[in-house]
Structure formats: structure tokens, C-alpha cells
Amino acid sequence: MSFDAELELLVRARYPVLYIVTGEELRALDLLGEVARRRNKKLHEWSCSAGLVPAGTNIQSRKPANPATRDPLVALDHVLELVDPALFVFKDLHAFLNRSQPAVVRRLKDIALHLKHSLKTLVILSPVLDIPPELEKEITVLHLPLPDTAELGALLDQIVGELQARREVAVDLDEAGRARLLQAASGLSLAEAENVFARIIVQDGRLSGDDVNAVFAEKRQIVRKSGLLEYCAHEEHFGRVGGLGLLKDWLTKRGAAFTPEARAFGLSVPRGVLLLGVQGCGKSLCAKAVSALWQLPLLRFDMGRMFAGLVGSSEENMRRAIALAEGIAPAVLWVDEIDKAFAGTHGSGSSDGGTAARVLGTFLTWLSEKTAPVFVVATANEISNLPPELLRKGRLDEIFFVDLPAPGERREILRVHVARRGRNPDHYDVAVLAEAAVDFSGAELEEAINSALYDAYHAGTEVTTDHILASIQSTVPLARTMDEQIRRLRHWAEGRARRASAADPLPAGGEADAGATD
Ligand SMILES: Nc1ncnc2c1ncn2[C@@H]1O[C@H](COP(=O)(O)OP(=O)(O)OP(=O)(O)O)[C@@H](O)[C@H]1O
Ligand SMILES: [Mg+2]
């Protein structure tokens, strides 16, 4: 059912208090205005600055209206007193619905009982969902979805129509160009889309299908502002990832599925992977390399930031991030360290009234229901925090276990990093180095090369195998101190996850050269 239809149905069925979660206040008011018109009801608006006024009253004439109703208690009393069928839209009410304002909460509860037997409906508009438990039973929650292409299309047609009437700009928009613009604008709110279209027109004096780049640029801005998603540059590629052959193979095959030909062949769009494994072994690196491999934009979803409270941890924010990612699709959505986000959602640590759990629930639901070509790459190094729902088949295509590199892989990784520092790998005895670096992670191998470079530079010579060997020998790899944790991970992954590399699993403690790769 469409949002409008559901809204109207609830009004007709006399649901007393509706709570619409949206960042688009004006659009919601427009929709409510239409419902009011169709149902032959009056529309009143309340805000804490203007008090209760008939909808559509402009700001200047609001002042004298009824200043006493700025107080939410007085305004709610008015709702009781007015007798005509009406919708009362309360814009800032959520700020008053908390423990410090018990009277407001109580009054709203009383009013809800009364409204059930009247032709009046109270509607709360808010960008966040925040309902005190006392009111949960009386309030019905609706989420206003972002505008669909039809709504964006209507907006575009309206702008184009006005422009053509004034003959001020050249509009050169065929069916295909229009479709491209609308596709590019999906994920934007109506106001944002209007701004972009207007800006393009003002800047170039024309509007055509070629303006999609301007729309994408705007989206980039919005992505940045939202604070939840971040565009990452394509700085890594699989040439720089040593080992992990099975994972690379799997990803290479899946990449083809994003082409129209593959879709026509019947391949379904891959949903995503979870890369689970030991610290510093290339999980984040692979996430970055996938997007380069597939030539898709990479969006990093910073769950940690959201749960650290740096940006509002709300379902609305999560929904917004998802909508933006879908609006950018096809794209790779990288959810780094997803285990950290889940850590706060259970146990005694959760003190936020279940918000984190709800936000993650929104994410998980999207994962299993999504149809847009957004490929999720999630990384984690702890399984105990991960909810079983995430690990269930169907949410993601595959779980890969990224272990410490086998000897052959260590050689590859050493070669990668020697080459990255402008040296010819053939001039180094990587076999000896790999042999010495038992239990080293990729990050530690890289660090050994780095510090060898320092030593050589300090000594005023070129870096040699001996420098690197010395720095390997002076390093105690993390895996030794984290032995227990790694064993646990391996045990869990056994039979549950695919191995990311072809090399045999390492026997804990010592090892034999699996003889793989180079
Ligand atoms: N397989 C590898 N090939 C080449 N370089 C590697 C590899 N693994 C790790 N590295 C180097 O180590 C750095 C850190 O690795 P990365 O951030 O990908 O580890 P991670 O698995 O995400 O670890 P964490 O669990 O701590 O997040 C990389 O930027 C890269 O330079
Ligand atoms: Mg990482």
C-alpha cells in the first residue's frame, strides 16, 4: 500500500495519534493537506514557536494567532475543545515527550482516549522516532519514504513546465534523458532534488540528460553531510593483495553479474559477503579492492560512528543511509567492523532503550529484502558479538574466513609491499623472509618492511634482505599473544565459513610450508 493510502486509511479508521518519521516536514504537510481535503477535515499546525494555527498560515500572520498555545499543554487542550473534524499536526512535540515533562505525556494519553471517539486525529511529525513507553500503545508509527521516481518526475515536469513557459532556458530532455536524471536523483529528498535541478539550470542555463553528473555531485555532498556514509576513492586493487586466492576468484566471478548481459543470462545480483578473520590480514583491504575490481563506487558505512553517538543513532538515519546507497546503486557498501556495532546491542551494556537494536534490526531487514544492486562487504574479527540473523543464509551470499597468511602467501605479500615501496621484489630473498615470519599477519609483514627501510635509511644504505630479516626477527607477532582468540575463530569458521585462501590451514603453533602460490 502506498504511504498516502495507508495514512488515509488510519485517519478514517480513527487511529487517534499518528507519528510520522521524516526529515521532510513540508512534503509530509502537503500529503497531510491532501488527506484533510479528501476527508473534508480542517488542518491545524502546531509548533513551539507559533503555537496552534490553521495550516497554511504564513509566518508573519502567525504572531498574533494564539501565543498561549505555544505551551504544548495548552495546545493539547485546544485539540480537545475544537469540535470540527480535523487533523492536528504537531511539529516539535517529540522534544516534549520525555520524563522531564510528565504532564505532556499524561495529557497526550488522555487525549488519545478521547480522539478514538471523534473525527479528529493528532499527527506528530519528527525526524527521529522517540516514543516514551507510556505512550507506545496509543501511537501508530509511519515512516515517510523518500520520493519515488514518479514523485521526482512530477517535480521535474513542474520545473520544466515553468521554465518553458518563461522561455528562459533551453530544456533538452527526451524520455531517456529524463529517466537518467530521475534515476540519478533517487535517494534525494524532494527539496534536495529541487535544489539540484534548480542549480543546474541556473549554472548552465539549460537542462539535459547529460546533467546527471551534477546530480551525482550533489549526492556526494549529501552523503558527506549525512555523516554516516563516506565515498572512498579507488586507491586499492587486487594486484596489491597478496594471497587470498579463493576470495579473489569468487569476487572476480561475481563481478560479471553487474553487467546487463549477465542479468539477461539469468544471473542474480550478488548480495554481499562477510569477511571474518584475524586482525591485519587484509579484510579492509579486500573491501576496498572489490570496488576497483568491479568499477563500482565504494561507500563506507560507519556504524561505529553512529553508535558512538557522533551522528544520531536513529532508524531514520539508518534508513537515510540505506536510501542513499540504493540511490547510488550499483555500488559496494562497505560495513567495516560490523561486530563493533553489534557489541552494544545486547547484554548489560545497552542503556539506550533498545535504539541500537532497532537500528540494527532495520539494517538486517534491509539486507534480506533488498532488491537494489548494492553489494555489502562486511568485515569482523569477533563472532561472539554477531547476531545469528546476520549469519543466516540469505542475508549474505557467503562468509569468508581470512586466516593468517600461509608461507606462500607471505611471500606474495612481501613482494607486494616491496614493490609498493619502489623496489624490485626479485632483488630480495622473499622465501627466506617468509620462512622467518611465522605467524605474521599481512599488516605485520608490511610493518617489518617499513621499519627495515628506516634502518637502512639511517645507516645510509639501500635496504636489503638482511635489514628486513632483522626487523622480522625483532617482531613478536600479535598472533602469539592472541593465540587463544585465533584458535576460537578457526574453530568457529570450520564448516561454517569458506576459506579465503587456497592454502591449507595452519597447524596451531608450528607450521609446514603449504607450498602454495608463487
Ligand atoms: N593479504 C595482504 N596483502 C597485502 N597487504 C596486506 C594483506 N593483509 C594485510 N596487508 C597490509 O596490512 C594493512 C592492514 O590490513 P587490513 O586493514 O586490510 O587488515 P584487516 O583484516 O582489516 O584488519 P582488522 O581486523 O584489524 O581491521 C593493509 O593496508 C595492507 O597494507
Ligand atoms: Mg579492518
Image: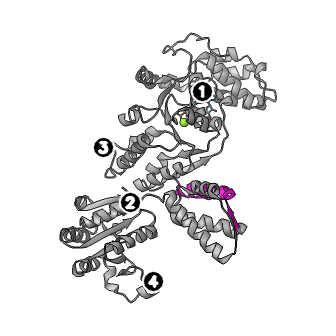
Residue at the (51%, 24%) spot, across then down: 479
Secondary structure beneath label 3: loop
Q: Is residue 420 left or right of residue 389?
A: right
* Mark 4 Cβ and ligand 2 under 8 Å apart: no
Residue at the (44%, 38%) spot, across then down: 339
Per the rendering, the mark at residue 348 is 3
Secondary structure beneath label 2: helix
Q: Residue furthest bottom?
A: 64
3D distance between C-alphas at marks 4 and 2: 27 Å
Report which residue position mark 4 lands on.
Answer: 58
Q: Does the magenta segment cover residue 210? A: yes
Coloring applied to the structure: one colour
Per the rendering, the mark at residue 3 is 2
Image location (x, y in percent) of residue 275 = 50, 31
Q: Main secondary structure of the magenta part?
A: helix
Instruction: Tell us which disc is closer to us: 4 or 2.
Output: 2
Residue type, label 4: Asn
First in sequence, mark 4 or 2: give its number.
2
| Range of residues picked out in magenta | 206-227
Residue type, label 1: Lys
3D distance between C-alphas at marks 4 and 3: 49 Å
Q: Write down the quadrant of residue 153 in the picture.
A: bottom right
First in sequence, mark 1 or 2: give its number.
2
Measured along the vertical axis of the image, is residue 187 above or below residue 382?
below
Secondary structure beneath label 4: loop
